[in-house]
Amino acid sequence: MENGLLDRVEGNANVHRWSEQTQLEKGDSIAAGHMSELSGYTRISVMQNNLQELKEIWDQWGNETKQLFYGNYGDLPYLLDVQIDERLFRALAQFWNPAYSCFTFWKVDLVPTVEEYTALLRCPRFQVDRIYSQAVNVPTFWKKLMAITGMSEQWITTRIKEKGESKYISLDTLKGLILTHPDEAKRVDVFALSLYGLMVFPRALGYVDEATTDLFHRLSKSVTSVPAILAETFRSLGTCRKADKVVCRVYFEDYSSLKDIIASTRRVNLLEENWIALLQNLQSKDVEWRAPWMILGEILYRCGSFDWVPLLGIWDAIGYAPLLVLRQFGLRQFVPATHGLTQSEFAYRGADYKKRVGKISSAWNKTCRLKGVAISPATTL
């Protein structure tokens, strides 16, 4: 955040009164008769990039190189060990509420938050309120790749692939740089770009999309990628319409919650229909609202003139209302202000999207936070 003086922290009672008054004056997000454009049951593709070669490279790196990565990019490499339960993922997607950007399991609402993703990524280099937003004058693809890789224009341009209006660079090209680049820092940067392009923002199997390099190019300026990752999480769930037990026992400065989650995850072999039956009958008494690995003092709940939190992804924008799931933070739940939330999603195309992006980026310079937060999101079924 450029100007910390614009950051406002408020008490629970004040936020409650503001939310209640806003609801009375503006109304709810969903107008009467609102119908989701998504079908009631959608089949989801969970095809993944083959990351085995990247995992082998990571495992061969020495501790000094790994520490360089952690310092610049956080705990991303632990995602290489994540095993996706496809049946659980398909079942969860059926409970995604695209209007409110949250999971709704009968009377239980759950949603990932900026704070949770920030704690999981755990990158000391990022500044929480310096969010990524698409630059007005975006450098060309080859210029961004030159800056990231340190390779020549000719070397880069001969390796760029195009499909329609999209441009890509292949994993094979990036892998070659990771293995042979004489500069250790550049090897780390290219490895991180590969993880962002193939795991966090995958678009074409085996390739890293140009939009990913735009965000990655900005990470060197200490901007945080967390809101963009959260935005693409919501957008993907909204388009396609975990829950293993995690026990965390220790807390210290170098503690990695993502590493602990990977180490303690149990595979539960349930069919998709069994997951759906379990989730659709979920009640508050079945959920343990705690995340002992993440102790917070504040939670971001709105930005600027928005009554919720707008998020800028790398292809689209969307928003969510953290006040909808206050129980995740150990606080008393009340009806959140959500006016305009259903109109928050837009793609980066057309005549006016850059103006809307600029408005959201400016709003993040005027953040409002709720104080007195004891704990934050995690569930144990």
Image: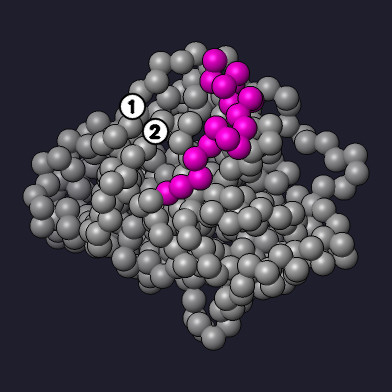
Mark 2 and mark 1 residues within 8 Å of each other at the beta carbon: yes
What residue is shown at x 8% (from left), y 50% (from top)? Answer: 62
* Percent x, y of residue 124: 31, 66
The residue singled out by tag 2 in the image is 245
Q: Residue furthest front?
A: 285
Disc 2 vs disc 1: which is toward the camera? 2
What residue is shown at x 10% (from left), y 52% (from top)? Answer: 63
In magenta stretch: residue 57: no
Q: Looking at the picture, does residue 241 appear above or below residue 312?
A: above
What residue is shown at x 90% (from left), y 39% (from top)? Answer: 33
Magenta region: 274-291
The residue singled out by tag 1 in the image is 266
Render colour scheme: one colour
- Identify the amino acid type marked 2: Lys
User: For mark 1, does the 10 Å Cα neighbourhood hold few (<14), some (14 to 19), or many (20 or more) residues?
Assistant: few
* Percent x, y of residue 114: 51, 57
Q: Nearer the viewer, residue 278 or 114?
A: 278
